[in-house]
Image (cartoon, rainbow, N blue to C red):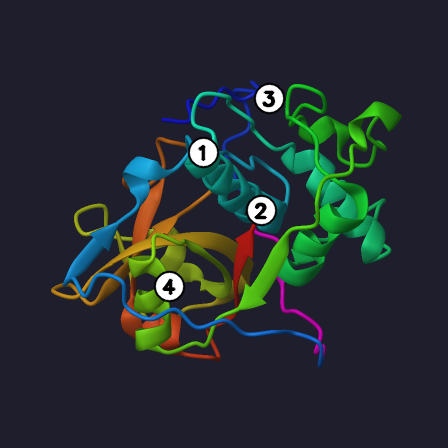
Amino acid sequence: MGLYFSYFLEDSVDFNKYGWKRDSPDYRDKYIHYNFLLDAEDLDLRHKMPGIYNQYSIGSSTANAVAAAYEFNHIQIDEEHIFIPSRLFIYYNTRKIENTIMYDAGAQIRNTIKSININGICSETKWNYNPCYLTNKPFDECYIHIPPIQYYRIHQNIAALKGCLSNGIPFIFGFSVYENFEKINKIDNTLSVPGDKDIYLGGHCCLCVGYDDAKKTFIIRNSFGLEWGDNGHFNMDYEYMLNTNLCSDLWVIKN
């Protein structure tokens, strides 16, 4: 489902940046709560998701996560007509909001979502994902306005997060990256709370697509390509996700 073909085929790029910045406070943020639709010990939405993206060497993780959530919603409505959102379009217009157009500065999740309501969204076939075009303004014809998407915060507790997923809704979130993230054990592919000696590397944004009570982990969709981790995914300990010093800015979108 959702076969994805990258338009940036630079084989020499073998490293990744992150790019999540914590949201600035905003009293207008609204929260949504989902009751358990299916009280299961484990849940996995990966089979319903689009193909894995690769952000390559730029810090566009927020655009990648939001685009994945947007494409997921599109698939649920119209599976036959593939629409891959332009991540570079989203990232450019988010940086326009944050006055960082000329820099690979990363972005806030709220602003990333907000940029779609302000500027619309176009297909990746119209504005390809080529990091060389990072600071280029997309063509005028890319700016196609769409009905506004709704976006809500969700509370950072186990009942709220599992309730959201049990309703078939993945959530976007940001987390602090330490050295242990780049040393995830290939056997269990699980990110645990960093140790005292782990060095902070930056902020990253991903999409949560499931959970497993037996392992006490969430299933996380990354944006480092299909060959990274478990076919582009990793597991995150409940303890990590629920720690507000490590994770924050949990959002769902409706389009």
The x, y position of residue 115, in whole percent, is 75, 50
- Kind of residue at badge 1: Ile
Residue at image position (24%, 63%) is 217
The x, y position of residue 64, in whole percent, is 56, 43
Question: For this view, does 123 lie left or right of residue 250?
Answer: right
User: Are the residues tagged 3 and 4 within 8 Å (C-beta)?
Assistant: no
Q: Mark 3 = which residue?
A: 8
The numbered mark at residue 46 is none
Badge 4 or badge 1: first in the primary sequence: 1
Mark 4 is surrounded, within 10 Å at the Cα level, by few (under 14), some (14 to 19) or many (20 or more) other residues, namely many
Element at label 1:
helix
Residue at image position (66%, 53%) is 113
Nearest the eye: 59 or 89: 89
Mark 2 is surrounded, within 10 Å at the Cα level, by few (under 14), some (14 to 19) or many (20 or more) other residues, namely some
- Kind of residue at badge 3: Phe
Q: Is residue 150 magenta?
A: no
User: Are the residues tagged 2 and 3 within 8 Å (C-beta)?
Assistant: no
Q: Mark 4 = which residue?
A: 164
The numbered mark at residue 255 is 2
Mark 1 is surrounded, within 10 Å at the Cα level, by few (under 14), some (14 to 19) or many (20 or more) other residues, namely some
Residue 151 visible in the displayed image: yes
In the image, residue 8 sits, relative to residue 203, either above or below, namely above
The numbered mark at residue 75 is 1
